[in-house]
Image (cartoon, rainbow, N blue to C red):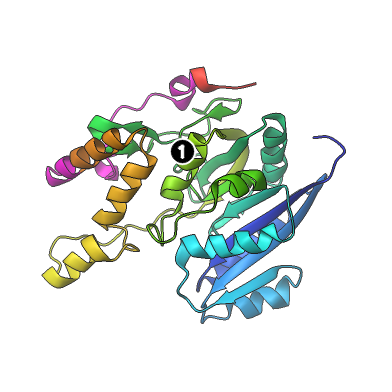
């Protein structure tokens, strides 16, 4: 990085995870900030467990925006980003609060962004209970297998050693130039109240922004909880979850939107959705870990060999 001080606003929405949120903020407080001007904005979306009060007491430098619990992930992040834009940072780092960070992670991300104009940067995400294992890094689109394919068998030793370009960066932690936000807008909270990152970085890519993973930057994430099964549900509740409630992880309408909006083309998105539904009906959903763990996965350093940049 040059001698110029680079301003970064860190934005995260939170709700009723006081201890996890405080752990995240403690981790951020230990991050090396040489050459960086870091401002943290937390959107407390209706917490009732004292999250906001605890943040104010322990981290008075953090800016807190309070809401009533109706924002959810996507609009909560958007609200924080709009507030951040008023401070005119060069970059906005959108994060989840269930993460801890290596001390150099942000310096590496900014360094890579500065070296590659019109780029959006993601770190290597790792599981905090199995810190050698990758988590939701560099999914690839496969129409015939039912859409975006996540990796289940990759480790820190199977990724490229240099930054590499991808087609999607999940929203757990992503560094976005404010110029990209001014050009392309924020996430679509109407279609995606709880999964806005599903279409956001592919939209930025279509607008000409490179999506880059920097393997030097490491972030440790809480494993995803297993969603409740849909089998055996009462019919009215099942229909609401699958069709009407866009916040539900199983919602098919939200999945349809995300396939159309994030796939390489609308046609491939529609076909991917059809193949996903077919495979799910046959008990071979590519998102089921039991199925995915039985598949052969080549190392990411081979998959993305041609995408490595120096």
Query: Could you say which is closer to the camera, residue 227 or residue 243?
Result: 243
Return the residue at label 1.
168
Q: In the rendered structure, does residue 287 fall within the stretch colored magenta? A: yes
**Left or right: where does residue 203 sit relative to residue 269?**
right
Quadrant assignment, res 246: bottom left
Q: Residues within 10 Å of mark 1 (few under 14, many from 20)?
A: many
| Residue at the image point whose x is 72% and y is 73% from the top | 58
Q: Is residue 59 above or below residue 28?
A: below
| Residue at the image point whose x is 31% and y is 27% from the top | 296
| Residue at the image point whose x is 75% and y is 55% from the top | 38
Observer able to see residue 122 = yes
| Residue at the image point whose x is 15% and y is 72% from the top | 236
Q: Is residue 303 above or below residue 40?
A: above
Secondary structure beneath label 1: loop
Toward the right, the furthest residue is 3
Q: Residue 72 in the image: x percent, y percent?
A: 45, 67
Q: Residue 176 in the image: x percent, y percent?
A: 61, 45
**Image quarter (top left, top right, bottom left or bottom right) of the C terminus:** top right
Q: Which residues are magenta?
A: 277-305
**Left or right: where does residue 176 sit relative to residue 186?**
right
């Amino acid at each position: 990085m040059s001698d110029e001080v680079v301003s970064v606003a860190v934005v995260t929405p939170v709700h009723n995870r006081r201890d996890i949120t405080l752990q995240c903020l403690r981790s951020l407080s230990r991050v090396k900030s040489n050459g960086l001007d870091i401002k943290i904005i937390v959107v407390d979306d209706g917490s009732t467990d004292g999250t906001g009060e605890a943040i104010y007491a322990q981290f008075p430098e953090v800016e807190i925006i309070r809401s009533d619990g109706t924002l959810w992930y996507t609009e909560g992040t958007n609200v924080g980003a709009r507030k951040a834009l008023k401070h005119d940072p060069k970059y906005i780092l959108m994060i989840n609060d269930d993460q801890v960070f290596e001390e150099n992670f942000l310096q590496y991300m900014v360094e890579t962004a500065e070296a590659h104009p019109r780029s959006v940067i993601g770190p290597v995400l790792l599981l905090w209970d199995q810190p050698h294992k990758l988590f939701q890094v560099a999914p690839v689109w496969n129409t015939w297998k039912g859409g975006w394919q996540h990796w289940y068998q990759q480790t820190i030793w199977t990724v490229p050693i240099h930054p590499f370009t991808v087609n999607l960066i999940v929203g757990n932690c992503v560094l976005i130039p404010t110029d990209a936000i001014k050009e392309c807008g924020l996430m679509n909270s109407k279609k995606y109240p709880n999964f806005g990152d599903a279409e956001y970085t592919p939209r930025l890519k279509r607008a000409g922004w490179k999506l880059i993973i920097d393997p030097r930057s490491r972030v440790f994430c809480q494993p995803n909880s297993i969603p409740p099964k849909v089998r055996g549900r009462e019919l009215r509740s099942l229909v609401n979850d699958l069709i009407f409630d866009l916040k539900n992880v199983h919602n098919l309408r939200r999945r349809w939107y995300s396939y159309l909006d994030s796939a390489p083309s609308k046609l491939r998105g529609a076909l991917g959705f059809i193949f996903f539904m077919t495979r799910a009906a046959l008990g071979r959903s590519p998102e089921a870990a039991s199925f995915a763990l039985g598949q052969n996965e080549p190392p990411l350093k081979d998959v993305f060999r041609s995408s490595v940049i120096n």
